[in-house]
Image (cartoon, helix red, strand yellow):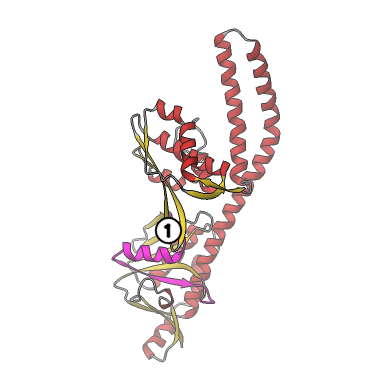
């Protein structure tokens, strides 16, 4: 009877040894395999797809129930945000979801999780060809070794990949919907906005009354605000192709800080940091300025009066490649769990209603 033996005692960085398909003549293993649920059982427990997270919740709970585990986890990478996600199921039916930023691949994620957790062992789940690592399954340490048919592991890999693909398709469809909306709205709304701003300019030119001038300026500012929101929607959904040129990251940062000097002074903030003189980057200048500006504006808005913002621009060598590292930090109020989970959603804002759509960090991520 062909079976999959998952050895949880392998070294964390040796992914090839984490999932090994082998034939066995062990009678006890053959008996366990014969009594083991077929891949169709796993498929029936998870499909059809409602949401990617629901599919993965069903997947982990099925693993946990079949193996009588106290807990079971699945980890994967979001193909759009490149954030790592870890979903943990517990025997009491409770679930936890964790998001980890700055993880580029599943190998790095496996190493991180192996170091972090002393109670969970992680195994790599590969595609049926055995070449691509598509996800990780976390099992309690006391579950030293399990045996499952090869089809069970292959089906697990296919289901994880289905969830990732579903997530990517849903995100792509949402972005396309935003783009279509922004294009239509821009055409229909910008024409009357142009009329409003043009008329405001004419009235301001001949209006001597200060109070009426103030009202006209407010009308013009709000009209421009609507125009900018439409533009942000379009840029977010369909960002222009970057025009790369050699830039100095430190110089670009300092120019942005000077441009935001009034907002910084109004809140009596101190801005400092470790900024090397030469930090060469290949980037689109206008898009890089947007990223830096939004990160600093986000810090300004989150920081109390007399607060502190730190902006570092440094160079570092990573595996023989030179990189520039930009770090923007502040001693402000930070994010709630809800704000953290939605910070890249352009239509979510942690601020009060009427104070912006929260496009700042979403634009940074998109660029």
Q: Give the residue drawn at x 41%, y 92%.
A: 25
- Crowd band around label 1 with a 10 angstrom C-alpha radius: few (<14), some (14–19), many (20+): few
* Image-based side of 191 in relation to 110, left or right: right
- Quarter occupied by residue 36: bottom left
**Magenta residues, start to end:** 102-130
Report the residue that reaches farthest toward the top. Answer: 208
Q: Give the residue drawn at x 41%, y 25%.
A: 266
Q: From the viewer's perspective, is residue 94 above or below residue 157? A: above
Q: Give the residue drawn at x 61%, y 26%.
A: 223
Look at the image and tell me whether residue 367 can be seen. Answer: no
On the image, the x and y values in percent for residue 338 come to: 41, 44
Q: In this orientation, which residue lies closer to the viewer: 97 or 252?
A: 252
Q: In this orientation, which residue lies closer to the viewer: 125 or 83?
A: 83
Q: Give the residue drawn at x 39%, y 28%.
A: 267
Regarding mark 1 in the picture, which secondary structure is present there? strand
On the image, the x and y values in percent for residue 166 come to: 56, 59
* Residue tagged 1: 317
| Magenta region includes residue 123 | yes
- Quarter occupied by residue 169: bottom right
| Magenta region includes residue 325 | no
Q: From the viewer's perspective, is residue 280 above or below residue 119? A: above
Look at the image and tell me whether residue 130 can be seen. Answer: yes
On the image, the x and y values in percent for residue 360 come to: 50, 40
Q: From the viewer's perspective, is residue 39 above or below residue 113? A: below
């Amino acid at each position: 009877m062909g079976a999959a033996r998952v050895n949880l005692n392998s070294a964390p960085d040796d992914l090839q040894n984490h999932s090994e398909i082998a034939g066995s003549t062990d009678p006890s293993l053959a008996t366990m395999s014969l009594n083991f649920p077929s891949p169709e059982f796993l498929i029936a427990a998870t499909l059809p797809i409602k949401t990617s997270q629901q599919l993965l919740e069903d997947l982990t709970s099925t693993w946990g129930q079949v193996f009588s585990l106290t807990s079971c986890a699945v980890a994967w990478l979001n193909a759009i945000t490149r954030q790592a996600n870890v979903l943990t199921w517990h025997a009491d039916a409770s679930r936890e979801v964790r998001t980890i930023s700055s993880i580029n691949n599943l190998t790095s994620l496996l190493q991180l999780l192996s170091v972090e957790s002393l109670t969970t062992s992680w195994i790599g789940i590969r595609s049926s060809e055995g070449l691509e690592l598509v996800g990780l399954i976390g099992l309690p340490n006391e579950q030293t070794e399990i045996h499952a048919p090869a089809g069970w592991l292959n089906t697990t890999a296919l289901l994880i990949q289905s969830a990732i693909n579903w997530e990517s398709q849903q995100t792509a469809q949402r972005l396309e919907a935003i783009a279509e909306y922004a294009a239509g709205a821009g055409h229909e709304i910008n024409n009357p906005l142009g009329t409003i701003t043009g008329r405001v300019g004419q009235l301001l030119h001949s209006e001597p009354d200060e109070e009426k001038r103030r009202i006209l300026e407010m009308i013009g500012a709000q009209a421009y605000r609507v125009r900018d929101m439409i533009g942000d929607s379009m840029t977010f959904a369909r960002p222009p192709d970057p025009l790369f040129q050699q830039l100095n990251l430190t110089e670009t940062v300092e120019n942005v800080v000077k441009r935001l000097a009034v907002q910084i002074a109004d809140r009596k903030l101190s801005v400092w940091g470790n900024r090397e003189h030469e930090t060469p980057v290949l980037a689109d200048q206008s898009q890089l300025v947007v990223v830096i500006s939004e990160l600093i504006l986000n810090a300004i808005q989150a920081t109390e009066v007399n607060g502190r913002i730190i902006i570092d621009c440094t160079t570092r060598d990573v595996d023989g490649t030179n990189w520039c590292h930009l770090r923007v930090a502040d001693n402000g109020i930070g994010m709630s769990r809800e704000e953290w989970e939605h910070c890249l959603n352009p239509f979510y804002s942690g601020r009060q209603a009427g104070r912006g759509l929260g496009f700042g960090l979403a634009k940074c991520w998109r660029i």
